[in-house]
Image: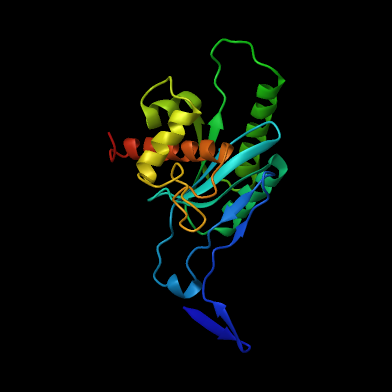
Amino acid sequence: MNETKNGLTVPAAALVITISWPQPCRMEVPGPKADERNDHKAMAIILAIDPGTKESGYVVADYETLRPLRFGKEDNATILSIIGDVLGTSSDECTVALEMVASYGMPVGREVFETVRWIGRFEQHIRDGFPGTEIRYVYRRDEKLAICHSPKANDATIRRALADRFAYGTRNGGKGTKKEPGFFYGFRADIWQAFAVAVTCHDAIEKEKGNML
């Protein structure tokens, strides 16, 4: 439905997309308008982050449906700002899920330590600025078991399992097309990994509640 403002006809609602490709990208889907939020119960959301040495992927997902509401891959300084934006401006209940590095007894290099340093900075930013926010660490092995039920799973099999669960039968691995966007439209690279973190966190919480086997 359109609205008329100052003699001009404009859409009542629009999908707002900001993409820098192949540079770090961000996509946002606006929530309900103010007049649609009457008697609206706060929606629970998950902010999931796949941390890296310089850039990190992130996804903000609706807890109930796990539908992505906002996602992208940004430099880590920007991720700090996004954390503040999501936690500081939302009235919704938010759980933050951070992928955590695990030790398997093998030598590691500088990149691993730099990633761990950023994980610590993200956590400190949350705890200092938004005390009381639930933070959960998600390990890669847990993602493989939760999503693919196999410790031998890799990025490709995880993406396939996610597409089968949330966008079965949708073209282009669940992403769809520009004309007919799918559940994962706009996803790439580390954004998939961040969504895997969100799904693993969600399923772990639901199992703790006894809602999932």
Using the rendered view, name the quadrant where residue 150 is placed: top left
**Residue 53: % across, % down:** 69, 31
Of residues 92 and 180, the one nearer the viewer is 180
Relative to 11, say whether 51 is above or below: above
Instruction: Please tell me which residue is depicted at 49% across the width and 40% down the height of the picture.
Output: 195
Residue 50 left/right relative to 37: right
Report the number of numbered marks: 0
Q: Residue at x 56, y 85 (%)?
A: 4
Q: Residue furthest bottom?
A: 7
Q: Nearer the viewer, residue 23 or 78?
A: 23
Q: Residue at x 35, y 44 (%)?
A: 168
Q: Please state which of residues 97 and 11 is positioned toward the viewer in this rendering.
A: 11
- Is the C terminus in the top left, top right, bottom left or bottom right quadrant? top left
Q: Position of residue 118 (x, y in %)?
A: 67, 33
Give the answer, above or below, for where 12 lies relative to 201: below
Q: Position of residue 68 (x, y in %)?
A: 48, 50
